Amino acid sequence: MKEFIIDETGAEMRLDRFLRREIPGLTQGVLQKLLRTGKVRLNGARAEANARLTAGDTLTAPEIEPEQKPRARQVVKMDPVRQKELEAMVLYRDASLLVLNKPAGLAVQGGSGITVHIDGMLDALQGDAPERPKLVHRIDRDTSGLLIIARSGRAAKFLTAAFRGRDVEKTYWALLAGVPELLEGRIDLPLKRIDLGTTSRAEPASRKDKEAQKAITDYRVLDRAGKRFCLVELKPHTGRMHQLRAHCLALGTPILGDAVYGGIFSEHFAQQLHLHARRLVIAHPEGGLLSIEAPLPKHMRDGLAYLGFSTPEAEPAKRGR
């Protein structure tokens, strides 16, 4: 049997899609037969094709002989301009890991119609390391900010466990349309993933709903312009798909530029999602804690300037014992 421990990159995926991604050449017919005969187990129990995976789940399946040639790993063709842009994203580098400031609009992984993504460019970041860098978590394509990349298999295992165990302090900044009634609080609202054909979204769900997933976010308003706009700090305690976007909408204050969750568009703001992964504090594979902040992207700096808000500089990376 082959065992998979689900990490952040597999969380929220359907079980059948995850297995087809992880087992090259696995056909739908073979997968359906394995599921029907109970040979695929999720946390020890018989699994269904449409089961949603959660970070930390254990998934087992028989070793399968592929019925077709495996797909080659997609590698993004690098030219001098793209290489320079990629290097400019690097905020921190040591023997164990890299930290990137990902721009909004750049996907972390490939998918339908996505040919340029971070995963496909990791070979260009290998440098003098003996192994190809590895993803250990992800952020949405339209979200900018911090992305940690492991530089070895050992570091990847350590960092994946940290994200899976929620031992990472994540802080996001967002510009919202409107101001929450309470300027500080906690959003404890379960979410349910809704498939919409080629895309998905998260919607509030009853706690009694079997498909509902626990979702908790702390928020704090940092600055505001009357009752029309505000800058908010968001700290997720869970990692659900689109959690911050759905929770901000539930407050009645959607994120600016969020076409999926009701964010307004205005000539005064860029037509982009104003959500940024600002700060991470995580245990370092070699010991101690790494604390790092990412500078805001231009479209968010412009939005803050228009509203008359200050734009604090990002703190330098710190690694303490």
Image (cartoon, rainbow, N blue to C red):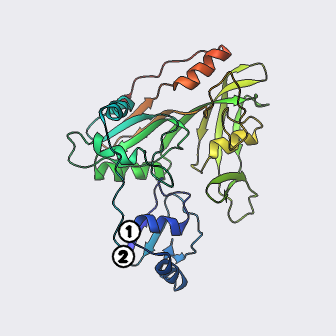
> How far is mark 2 from mark 1, CA to CA?
7 Å
Tally of numbered tags: 2
21 above or below 235?
below
Q: Which mark is residue 241?
A: none
Q: Is residue 106 left or right of residue 178?
A: left
The picture places residue 234, in percent across and down from the top left corner, at: 61, 35
Q: Is residue 225 left or right of residue 87?
A: right
- Name the secondary structure under disc 2: loop
Of the residues under marks 2 and 1, which one precedes in the sequence?
1
Q: Amino acid at mark 2?
A: Pro
Q: Looking at the image, can residue 226 be seen?
A: yes
The picture places residue 202, in percent across and down from the top left corner, at: 67, 52
Q: Residue drawn 40% across and 79% down?
A: 62
What is the quadrant of the C terminus in the image?
top left
Q: Looking at the image, can residue 287 be seen?
A: no
24 above or below 130?
below
Task: Estimate how packed mark 2 is, as few (under 14), some (14 to 19) or many (20 or more) residues with alpha carbons within 10 Å.
Answer: few
The picture places residue 245, in percent across and down from the top left corner, at: 65, 42
What is the quadrant of the N terminus in the image?
bottom left
Residue matched to label 2:
66
Assess whether mark 1 and mark 2 are in contact (beta carbons under 8 angstroms).
yes
64 above or below 129?
below
213 above or below 228?
below
Q: Amino acid at mark 1?
A: Pro
Q: Which mark is residue 24?
A: 1
Q: Residue drawn 45% across and 50% down?
A: 109
Q: Residue drawn 69% across and 23% down?
A: 267
Q: Residue drawn 29% across and 53% down?
A: 153
Task: Estimate how packed mark 1 is, as few (under 14), some (14 to 19) or many (20 or more) residues with alpha carbons within 10 Å.
Answer: some
The picture places residue 140, in percent across and down from the top left corner, at: 54, 44
- Name the secondary structure under disc 1: loop
